[in-house]
């Protein structure tokens, strides 16, 4: 008797956990995010907020759509993630020259909080690199960069 399409093959489900790129990348991402969030707690920032503030700091005043593209984020998700730092006065969002464009700028308070968070980030980053070893860490970064490129070009 043939299995119906609606029946689950449990061996396939076990294989997903062991071999699925997405499952394992998200699992690793959650674990690393939790570690960085815990270590950044004294700064009041989550690692997702730190990443956004760093990008704004590097890019200067930047359109939300350009920031989303640089962070490989959906514009709607980024807009939602910008609300807490805007409420806390870490960033300012203003209309651009074209009123349809909104521009994000890091405030003085945002620079100050970022300066407080960076040493915490550096300590955590150093722990990750030391734990993996520099060679494995470099391989990890290279592999992740390639993975992003493959996913974006598929």
Image (cartoon, grey):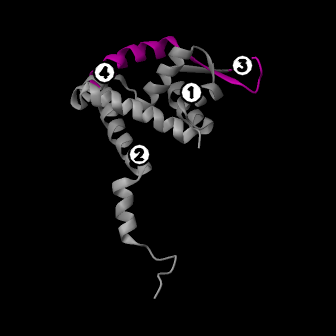
| Residue underneath mark 1 | 70
Q: From the viewer's perspective, is 132 left or right of 110? A: left
Residue at 35 percent of width and 68 percent of height: 11
For residue 88, say whether it is visible.
no
Magenta range is 95-124
How far apart marks 1 and 3 lie (CA) works out to 18 Å
Marks 1 and 3 close (CB-CB < 8 Å)? no
Marks 4 and 2 close (CB-CB < 8 Å)? no
Circle nearer the viewer, 1 or 3: 1
Q: Nearer the viewer, residue 121 or 44?
A: 121
How far apart marks 3 and 2 lie (CA) works out to 35 Å
Quadrant of the rendered structure where residue 118 is? Answer: top left
Q: Nearer the viewer, residue 67 or 104?
A: 67
| Residue underneath mark 3 | 96
Mark 4 vs mark 2: which is more N-terminal?
A: 2
Quadrant of the rendered structure where residue 62 is? Answer: top right
Residue at 46 percent of width and 13 percent of height: 111
Magenta stretch encompasses residue 115: yes
Circle nearer the viewer, 1 or 4: 1
């Amino acid at each position: 008797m043939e299995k119906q399409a609606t029946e689950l093959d449990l061996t396939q489900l076990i294989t997903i956990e062991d071999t699925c790129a997405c499952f394992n990348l998200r699992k690793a991402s959650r674990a690393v995010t939790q570690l960085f969030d815990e270590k950044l707690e004294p700064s009041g920032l989550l690692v997702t907020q730190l990443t956004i503030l760093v990008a704004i700091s590097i890019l200067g005043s930047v359109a939300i759509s350009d920031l989303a593209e640089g962070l490989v984020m959906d514009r709607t998700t980024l807009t939602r993630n910008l609300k807490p730092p805007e409420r806390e006065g870490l960033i300012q969002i203003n209309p651009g020259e074209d009123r349809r464009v909104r521009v994000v700028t890091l405030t003085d308070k945002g620079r100050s909080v970022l300066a407080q968070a960076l040493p915490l980030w550096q300590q955590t980053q150093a722990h990750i690199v030391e734990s993996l070893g520099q060679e494995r860490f470099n391989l990890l970064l290279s592999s992740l960069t390639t993975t992003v490129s493959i996913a974006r070009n598929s």
